[in-house]
Image (cartoon, grey):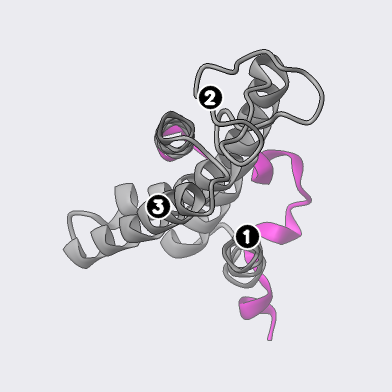
Amino acid sequence: MDSLIGGEVLCGLWEGGQTRFGNTCWRAIDSSLIASASAQVLKYVFTRARPIQRNDPNAWFQGGSHYSFPSGEVAAVSSIVTPFVFEYRNQQPGVWALEALPLYDAIARMKVQAHWQTDVLAGLAIGTAAGYYAHQRDSPLVLSVMPHAILVGLRRRF
């Protein structure tokens, strides 16, 4: 997940916001910020126990350190790949292979007993919704508050 986050930020800074690919990178940054914030708020609201903490999928509103629902990691991974899938799906059908990343992460999170199935499904839904929202906007949110130099990108300055 850290590699994906670092990759989207480096991609956005390198490409800038004027190219199609760079603009999509900035949309992925928007999407991941929205999804991560949403997932974190929901974790504090629902305070569901993780499978490794308590073997009861109905253990909601436990307080303390019970932050299983929704999966923030799955939300982040799916929010990063979704803008790329929506942007390039018609010209490059192979981009759908990126969807294997959040699916792999979801299965891994359940396998290590960090999340219930509904946790990762909710994370997938949050990440996909955030990615769709970021893709549908006229321009990326982050670029609207950043200095205009970011639009150009480091690649064009060299």
Q: Are marks 3 and 2 in contact (CB under 8 Å)?
A: no
Frontmost of labels 1 and 2 is: 2
The alpha-carbon separation of the residues under discs 3 and 2 comes to 19 Å
Residue designated by label 1 = 5
Q: In the rendered structure, which amino acid carries the disc numbered 2?
A: Asp
Locate the C terminus by quadrant: bottom right
Q: Position of residue 16 (x, y in %)?
A: 60, 63
Q: In the rendered structure, which amino acid carries the disc numbered 1?
A: Ile
Query: Is 155 included in the stretch rendered in magenta?
Result: yes
What secondary structure is found at the residue carrying circle 3? helix
129 or 59: nearer the eye? 59
Residue designated by label 3 = 107
Examine the residues drawn in magenta and state their main secondary structure: helix
Query: Is 108 included in the stretch rendered in magenta?
Result: no
What secondary structure is found at the residue carrying circle 2? loop
Residue designated by label 2 = 56
Q: Please give the count of numbered marks on the rendered protein.
A: 3
Left or right: residue 154 compared with residue 32:
right
In percent of the image, x 41 and y 48: which residue is there? 83
Q: Position of residue 27 (x, y in %)?
A: 52, 47
Q: Which residues are magenta?
A: 134-158
Labels 1 and 2: the sequence-earlier one: 1
